[in-house]
Amino acid sequence: MALSLRRTEQTNIELLRAKFSSAWTRTDELFDIVPTREVLTTPIVWRHPFIFYIGHLPVFSWNQICGAILNWKSFNPYFDDLFCRGIDPDVDTGECHWHPEVPDAWPSLADILEYRDNVRDVILESLEAVSRHKSNDIMAQGGRVFQMVLEHEYMHQETLLYMIQQLPLHKKIRPKNCPPSVFYAARLSEPISITAGKARLGAKFTDLSFGWDNEFGEVITEVPSFKIDSLPVTNQEYFEFVASGGYDDEQYWRPEDWRWKNLEVRHSPTSWMKSDDKWFYRAMFDVLPLSQVSSWPVYVSLAEARAYARWRGKRLPTEAEYHRAAYYGPNEIDTAYPWGDDEPERRHGNFDFTAWSPMPVGCRLAGTSGWGVRELFGNGWELTDTQFSPFPGFAPYVASYPDYSQDFFDGKHFVVKGASWATATDLLRPSFRNWYQAHYPYVFTKFRCVSD
């Protein structure tokens, strides 16, 4: 006879059941944007085709929960291996970490969808099974493995969207529930003085019900005084840099960034395009005059943000400066979010699919930090010039996924903080760290400038 579950465990299981159902619904809605005829398309050369991700999400779920924790017998070992890990090559050299060999032909979409549906059924069965399972694996305790799988799904939803953005408009299907974009004048940015003081990075393992290995341990650091823009740089502000010849002036670019820019023949951000003498912006489902989105934050790579900052006689913030500006204030109280300790809501920022595009910068005043710095969460990840590296005491604690972070402590990836419009609320915690290469220009990353 199966042991009965305590009421609190049963409540947690029902919460997880709802979260998985919601996550899968959103994932399916995003894949529905891509017509069946386009699933083998690779809109970004550094990524697999869409069909890989249709298989990767259920495979990751199976491997981490049913395989690593419960040791259940696989019903498709070939898929479990083929779709187990994606690619993130060095965009400068093409070298890549280990991943399964790309097949001559991907399995059929019908077979992958059948596998996905089978996995989803057994994941729901596993919710109670893991609770009853006597395991010393830290991931089996407190629902950690389920939260890991959910957050993995959330992160890939955003990956899927910035891949979809690179598709031509006629190759994607606009969702029926897609809200209209918002256009109005931006608020004026101003420099905010941040006094010297402490910043808390990372977290103690015991303080989080779940965190990725790179979030641990906790570091308290002293940050010198600095000034930071109250708002991120807009398309209009960045256009002034482009119009002044900034992409053709080597003095603003680091040597490695200049080489990359010339190799890629870049003259503007990825989402911009020029026709005759007119500039346009490629949004997710529309091509808009650049002037219409002048108040939206500009999305650029770290290399392009560095050049703009140098053009202005400034620089980009460090991870520690971001934390100082976001989670502290003149009263030196360390808060859970920039706006305080209230749980994230739509009034705090453009995240969790409030919109399907950026919005005018500074549009959510309720998200302002204690210093008066706005929009540190939402509307785009915040670029920092801090290399992605481990905190003291780092250890890969997920035995079935030991190289989650370690492969990217390579000096080529840099920390981004905050959230974009496509970032799930579960990821809005101070210790969460995202990371991208300096020469990877496709993601929803904005930036602001600082000075000493």
Image (spheres, helix red, strand yellow):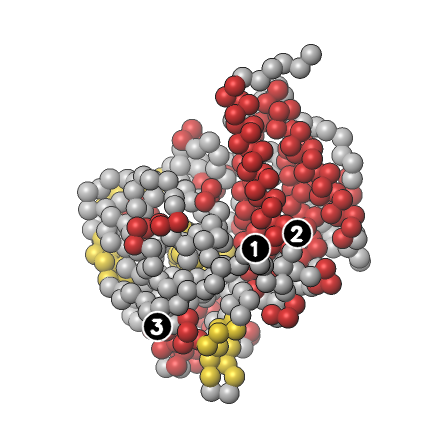
Crowding at dot 3, Cα within 10 Å, few <14 / some 14-19 / many 20+, comes out as some
Q: Amino acid at mark 1?
A: Thr
- Element at label 1: helix
- Residue 388 as seen in the image, left or right of residue 374: right
- The residue positioned farthest toward the front in the image shown: 176
Query: Of the numbered discs in the image, which one, if any, rests on residue 237?
Result: 3
Q: Position of residue 71 (x, y in %)?
A: 70, 28
* Distance (Cα) linking label 1 and label 3: 27 Å
Q: Quadrant of residue 240?
A: bottom left
Name the residue located 43 percent from the left edge and 81 percent from the top edge. Answer: 248
For the residues labelled 2 and 3, say whether their Cβ atoms are less than 8 Å apart.
no
Q: Which is nearer the eye, 49 or 265?
A: 49
Crowding at dot 1, Cα within 10 Å, few <14 / some 14-19 / many 20+, comes out as some
* Distance (Cα) linking label 2 and label 1: 10 Å
- Element at label 3: helix
- Tell me which label, 2 or 3, sits earlier in the chain: 2
Query: Of the numbered discs in the image, which one, if any, rests on residue 448?
Result: none
- Residue 39 as seen in the image, left or right of residue 25: right
For the residues labelled 2 and 1, say whether their Cβ atoms are less than 8 Å apart.
yes
Q: Which residue is mark 1?
A: 159
Name the quarter where the C terminus is drawn.
Answer: bottom left
Q: Position of residue 208 (x, y in %)?
A: 43, 33
Q: Which residue is mark 2?
A: 53
Name the residue located 61 percent from the left edge and 67 percent from the top edge. Answer: 167
- Residue 420 as seen in the image, left or right of residue 320: right
- Residue 402 as seen in the image, left or right of residue 317: right
Q: Amino acid at mark 2?
A: Tyr
